[in-house]
Image (spheres, rainbow, N blue to C red):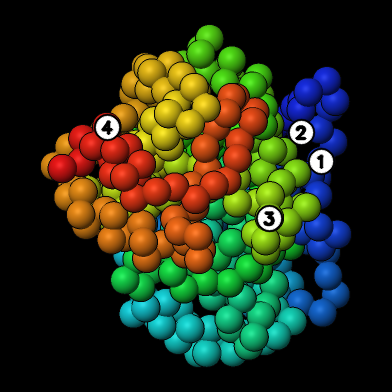
Amino acid sequence: MCSETPRTYFGDTPLVEPIRITDASEVVFGDAADVLPARQSREAVAVFTQPGVPARVAREIVAGLEGVRTVVGELADREASKELDAVGEMYDVLADFNLGRHDTIIGVGGGAATDVAGFVAATWLRGVESVLVPTTTLAAVDAAIGGKTGINRRGKNLVGAFWNPSRVVVDLNLLSQLPEEILREGTSEILKAGLLADPAIVDEYARAGLKANLEVVVPRAIAVKADVVRDDLQERGRRAILNFGHTVGHAVEILAPLPHGHAVSVGMVAAAVISNSRYGFDHRWLTALLFDLGLPVAAAGVSLAAAVELCQRDKKRTAEGIRMVLLRDVGDPVVEPVTLPELEGAMRAIGLS
């Protein structure tokens, strides 16, 4: 449990909690005990936790819910929680519990947990309050921030809704105690934020590798995403830059299969290859940085044809073709349609055949 509010910085400006995304959506740094925003009309809370969440986190959350009816449900592990059958079981819990329109759903766990808890909150009774407690670095800097919710149906996150949580609680002390492999998986999303808009994050990882200071890189990455989302809640413009590495990454995630953060690492290499051919971006430098962090930079054995098919089904496609986020330089992203030969060339560069 954090003994005091962490002092964190974005640029030269102290980050005063909370970080606002909208007037009704905030990110706070602290511990899980003080999870709910103050509100008089709330009568009940449903808490959904993911396997692997430290027991003390769930205990602290429930202990802080005095005065309201509470039910606790366990999600399936990782992406299995985002299948329709698993989502149906969550709806059954809410129906049996009689969760009302003025009540709250709390999602606790990694990116899959925050995705599905947010989706269920967006769709139960046409929308109830959600609060998210991410327990991995990947969820803390990406999945829990910005109101994108989703479940899987013949592709990743093809069914979803924009539904901002009223509060996201990020426990930096908890994140600092994560196993190295879980910490590493989230590193790709933190580094992505740096590549898009904050070179200081990139510099910190180049300097310290996986020992990068989480009290620096996590709030900075959240601040990058909050700044983008604040201007474009429903991804009609600038928010699309946050998909860097995700077009090819989502296909690799399904086909390899790989954990999301690892797949994004591979996808960033593919995007960097096209960025090199169009703008001279140094894809070898980025590949070496990801490799030094212990992240995968290739997906040998994955079918190129199957990956292309998934990319063509991806929700980011437009009438112009498959859109990808490319880098002209660190901090200078652009969203452009890519040709099929470019896409296939990038996939071959990461080992697909």
Q: Residue 247: image x %, image y %?
A: 42, 50
The three-letter code of the residue at mark 2 reads Thr
Task: Provide the secondary structure element on which disc 4 rests.
Answer: helix
The three-letter code of the residue at mark 4 reads Ala
Q: Is residue 155 above or below residue 69?
A: above
Between marks 1 and 3, how big is the CA–CA gap? 27 Å
Task: Provide the secondary structure element on which disc 1 rests.
Answer: loop
Question: Toward the viewer: 252 or 226?
Answer: 252
Question: Toward the viewer: 230 or 346?
Answer: 346
Q: Residue at x 81, y 57 (%)?
A: 22
Task: Determine which residue is flagged by label 4.
Answer: 349
Label 1 neighbour load within 10 Å: few <14, some 14-19, many 20+:
some
Between marks 1 and 2, how big is the CA–CA gap? 9 Å
Label 2 neighbour load within 10 Å: few <14, some 14-19, many 20+:
some
Left/right of residue 278 with respect to residue 19 in the rendered view: left
Task: Determine which residue is flagged by label 3.
Answer: 237
Determine whether label 3 and label 2 are within 8 Å by CB: no
The disc placed on residue 5 is 2
